[in-house]
């Protein structure tokens, strides 16, 4: 009979780690006597990062004594004791390759249901001083699992664990863990797992993404179950290629469009409406390079690429494109990329933009118009006045081609020549209150591009308005917001060259941060190097499992150590476990 060997709890605390502070509840200690287990926790327990741990479907973490014995031998350790793996219940029995999602157990007065495997997280490696532990747990098929509390009650170490119901479909914890994290995602196994009512919503969403991706073998391109970075098709070419400037036009007082084409006149590859390109600019033939990202604004099947460039004060990239570039010049350009693009569908579309954020939205409008889309399309745009409203006439012309098109333009400070009802439709800023007054459908897919505060306010407001978070998509012109789970917040710092002696390795370019720095051999990964440069990054496991750090590799090549359990999508790289093999440019 399986037995609860140890009941472990621990409240979150601050732990020093790699020069930072992590707020974590991973340090668990055994307790004597019974403890009440409630809907969200064992009494006396807590989680430091509720985004990745805790909640109803992850109330109690279970790990097995047999796995402790396995790791004692595998790691050559003699200090592993209950609670070391962050679990609440250390058990004798209940192996991951036998326990199934949806199984129910009674312990003491409480009833529990198995909901999902353990979350892959760097903190278990931090707790054990084994940095790649998250990867080892998956590759050795010993993740452990979470329980939902069906019936609250007291439990205590020494009590028997009584199975009272079998989970439907008989999908084991080890099987479903491998289904998501390891290569090979057979369609029938995904469908079987998705039929389990007890499976946590997060895991259901991941497996549904894999179903939609149509993966069926280890040769599939990336893993959309783990990251949206794998959702876009592979880039049309690797690295940078020379394109010639064929047209330059002033679209507003501070926005200039630049059209790029193949030097031999061939049509450039199509892209997905909303995607962007990176430019590598050199002020002098042998001078420093400047990396900049720009959204494409014309029709994706036009055979040429048009960008809109806003002149920024002291902006090296925008200043160069506004004052130095002429028709006939050749620029280095990376292929269109990005996960911000207009998805297929027949439901209503809501496009929200401000300032030069109009560029990817305009590309989406062209796509809808060229396909004679019957979809209801709402386009809301905000600008200061007519002189700061780029592509205004073009947007109106394209929208007239859409039978379900709605146009609303907000000027915060209209000029004397701006005409209400013609140039703009409302005085003031584009806000969620103004949007709610207009009443676009609440079942629409929303696409936002503009200043960071504009997108943050509208993204939050759209959820309050009634849109689900999965229907809200946004694009930033600079670096994306960082995701550093559990790290105590510090004041943000602009990206910079790392402190200390300059590296002697190949150059590492961070395209969205506008920084190129020589690699330093003292860093273990591109992630660590980016952190030393204060480039915003996104990560969780830090050992090639979760793919949270998956990033577009605009040029160059990397080496992996350790090898990721599943490769990233073609054209992408996992920065948490890779180093540059040559000069690289990352979409960070």
Image (cartoon, rainbow, N blue to C red):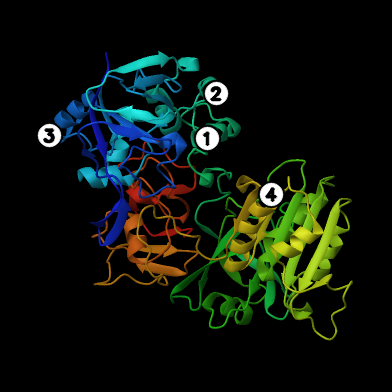
- Where disc 2 sits, the SS reads helix
Query: Counting other residues with Cα less than 10 Å from the Cα at mark 1, is it few (<14), some (14-19), or many (20 or more)?
Result: few
* Disc ID at residue 187: 2
Q: Which residue is mark 3?
A: 76
Left or right for 243, reference 570: right
Point out which mark residue 466 bears. 4
Q: Alpha-carbon distance for marks 1 and 2?
A: 19 Å
The image shows residue 23 at horizontal and vertical percentages of 32, 54
Q: Is residue 191 left or right of residue 165?
A: right
Residue drawn at (82%, 49%), measured in percent from left and top?
A: 376
Front one among 130 and 290 = 130
- Residue 457 figure quarter: bottom right
Q: CA distance from mark 2 to mark 3?
A: 39 Å
Q: Is residue 130 visible?
A: no
Quick check: marks 2 and 3 in contact, CB under 8 Å?
A: no
Instruction: Identify the mark nearer the N-term, 1 or 2.
Output: 2
Mark 4 and mark 2 in contact? Answer it, CB < 8 Å.
Answer: no
The residue tagged 1 is 201
Q: Is residue 155 visible?
A: yes
Q: Earlier in the sequence, mark 2 or mark 3?
A: 3
Nearest to the eye among marks 1 and 2: give it.
1
Q: Quadrant of the N terminus?
A: top left
Secondary structure beneath label 4? loop
Which residue is most to the left? Answer: 78
Mark 4 or 2: in front is: 4
Name above or below for residue 505 compared with residue 40: below
Which comes before the other along the chain, label 4 or label 2?
2
527 shown above or below 229? below
């Amino acid at each position: 009979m399986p037995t609860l060997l140890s009941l472990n709890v621990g409240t979150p605390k601050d732990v020093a780690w790699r020069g930072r502070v992590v707020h974590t509840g991973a340090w668990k200690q055994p307790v004597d006597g019974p403890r009440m287990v409630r809907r969200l926790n064992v009494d006396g327990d807590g989680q430091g990062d509720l985004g990745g741990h805790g909640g109803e479907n992850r109330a109690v973490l279970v790990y097995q004594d047999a796995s402790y014995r396995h790791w004692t031998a595998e790691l050559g350790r003699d200090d592993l004791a209950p609670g070391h793996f962050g679990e609440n219940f250390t058990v004798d029995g209940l192996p991951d390759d036998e326990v199934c999602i949806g199984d129910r157990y009674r312990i003491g007065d409480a009833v529990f249901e198995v909901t999902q495997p353990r979350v892959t997280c760097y903190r278990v490696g931090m707790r054990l001083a084994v940095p790649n532990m998250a990867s080892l747990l998956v590759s050795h098929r010993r993740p452990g699992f979470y329980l939902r509390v069906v019936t609250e009650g007291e439990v205590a170490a020494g009590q028997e664990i009584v199975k009272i119901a079998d989970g439907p479909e008989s999908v084991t914890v080890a099987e479903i863990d491998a289904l998501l994290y390891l290569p090979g995602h057979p369609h029938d196994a995904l469908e079987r797992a998705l039929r389990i009512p007890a499976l946590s919503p997060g895991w259901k969403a991941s497996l549904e993404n894999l179903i939609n991706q149509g993966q069926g073998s280890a040769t599939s391109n990336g893993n959309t179950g783990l990251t949206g970075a794998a959702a876009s098709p592979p880039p049309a070419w690797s690295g940078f290629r020379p394109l010639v400037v064929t047209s330059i036009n002033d679209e507003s007082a501070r926005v200039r469009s630049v059209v790029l084409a193949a030097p031999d006149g061939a049509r450039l590859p199509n892209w997905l409406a909303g995607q962007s390109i990176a430019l590598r600019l050199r002020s002098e033939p042998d001078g420093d390079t400047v990396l900049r990202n720009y959204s494409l604004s014309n029709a994706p099947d036009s055979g040429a690429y048009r960008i809109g460039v806003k002149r920024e004060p002291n902006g090296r990239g925008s200043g160069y494109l506004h004052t130095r570039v002429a028709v006939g010049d050749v620029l280095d350009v990376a292929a269109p990329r990005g996960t911000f693009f207009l998805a297929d569908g027949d439901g209503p579309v809501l496009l929200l933009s401000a300032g030069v954020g109009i560029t990817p939205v305009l590309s989406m409008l062209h796509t809808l118009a060229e396909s004679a889309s019957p979809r209801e399309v709402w386009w809301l745009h905000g600008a200061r006045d007519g002189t700061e409203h780029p592509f205004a006439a073009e947007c109106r012309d394209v929208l007239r081609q859409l039978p379900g098109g709605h146009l609303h333009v907000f000027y915060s400070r209209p000029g004397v020549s701006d005409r209400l009802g013609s140039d703009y439709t409302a005085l003031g800023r584009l806000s969620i209150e103004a949007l709610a007054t207009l009443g676009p459908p609440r079942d629409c897919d929303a696409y936002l591009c503009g200043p960071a505060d504009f997108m943050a306010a509208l993204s939050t407001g759209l959820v309050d308005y009634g849109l689900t978070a999965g229907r809200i998509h946004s694009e930033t012109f600079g670096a994306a917001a960082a995701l550093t789970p559990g790290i105590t917040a510090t004041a943000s710092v602009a990206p910079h060259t790392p402190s200390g002696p300059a590296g002697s390795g190949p150059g590492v370019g961070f395209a969205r941060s506008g920084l190129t720095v020589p690699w330093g051999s003292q860093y273990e990964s591109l992630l660590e190097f980016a952190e030393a440069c204060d480039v915003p990054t996104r990560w969780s496991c830090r050992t090639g499992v979760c793919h949270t750090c998956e990033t577009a590799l605009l040029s160059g090549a990397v080496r992996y150590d350790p090898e990721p359990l599943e490769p990233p999508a073609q054209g992408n790289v996992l920065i948490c476990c890779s180093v540059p093999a040559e000069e690289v440019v990352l979409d960070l």
